[in-house]
Image (cartoon, rainbow, N blue to C red):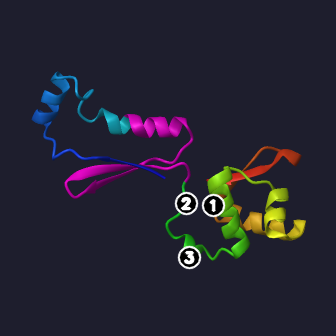
Amino acid sequence: MARFLLAFPTITPSLANLLFLIKYIERWGTGTNNIIKWCKEEDLPEPIFKEVTGGFSVVLRKFQIPENLESLELNERQKKAIEYLKIHKNITRKIYMEINNISPRQANKDLSDLLEKKLIRKQGRGRAISYVLK
């Protein structure tokens, strides 16, 4: 998860106008809309904008993992797959079977459960099917 902290004091429209005139910023209020647009264009989750003490932060994410991950009751194999996906970006049923030392039937059951919980999505067709974080 990439985090950027913009440590500006509270910026008023008049201060923003001065920053615009000296070419320090583009325009007041256009940056957040551009960030959201660029994330959508790259098929990334929308960023999280937070007001923090004395500043503002924008959290850019490569994928979206629910904050209530613990309440989804994942088994250890599924947790291992989520960790694998964070690093390798995609996983196949064959790889899932190998890292968990399980049968194809169990792998299908586990992956179907992750699909139902909307943690992963399928991509590709036939033998080329792989799974990525949603």
> Is any part of residue 133 visible from this angle?
no
Q: Alpha-carbon neighbours of circle 2 within 10 Å: few (<14), some, or many (≥20)?
A: some
Residue 40 image offset from top left, x and y in percent? 51, 39
Mark 3 residue type:
Ser
Q: Nearer the viewer, residue 66 or 52?
A: 52
Kindly identify the residue that appears in the image at 64 percent across and 65 percent down: 117
Q: Which residue is mark 1?
A: 119
Of mark 3 and mark 1, the one earlier in the sequence is: 3
Kindly identify the residue that appears in the image at 25 percent across and 29 percent down: 25
Callout 3 touching callout 1 (CB < 8 Å) = no
Left/right of residue 66 with respect to residue 83 in the rendered view = left
Of mark 3 and mark 2, the one earlier in the sequence is: 2
Q: How many marks?
A: 3
Rounded to the nearest angstrom, the CA distance separating label 1 from label 2 is 7 Å
Q: Which mark is residue 65?
A: 2
Q: Which residue is mark 3?
A: 71
Mark 1 residue type:
Leu
User: Was residue 43 drawn as part of the magenta stretch in this picture?
Assistant: yes
Kindly identify the residue that appears in the image at 27 percent across and 26 percent down: 26
Taking the view exactly as shown, the residue that stands out farthest to the left is: 14
Left/right of residue 22 with respect to residue 115 in the rendered view = left
Residue range in magenta is 34-63
Relative to 50, say whether 77 is above or below: below
Mark 2 residue type:
Ile
Rounded to the nearest angstrom, the CA distance separating label 3 from label 2 is 12 Å
Residue 43 image offset from top left, x and y in percent? 57, 41
SS for dot 3: helix
User: Was residue 127 drawn as part of the magenta stretch in this picture?
Assistant: no
Kindly identify the residue that appears in the image at 63 percent across and 60 percent down: 119
Callout 1 touching callout 2 (CB < 8 Å) = yes
Of mark 1 and mark 2, the one earlier in the sequence is: 2
Residue 54 image offset from top left, x and y in percent? 19, 54
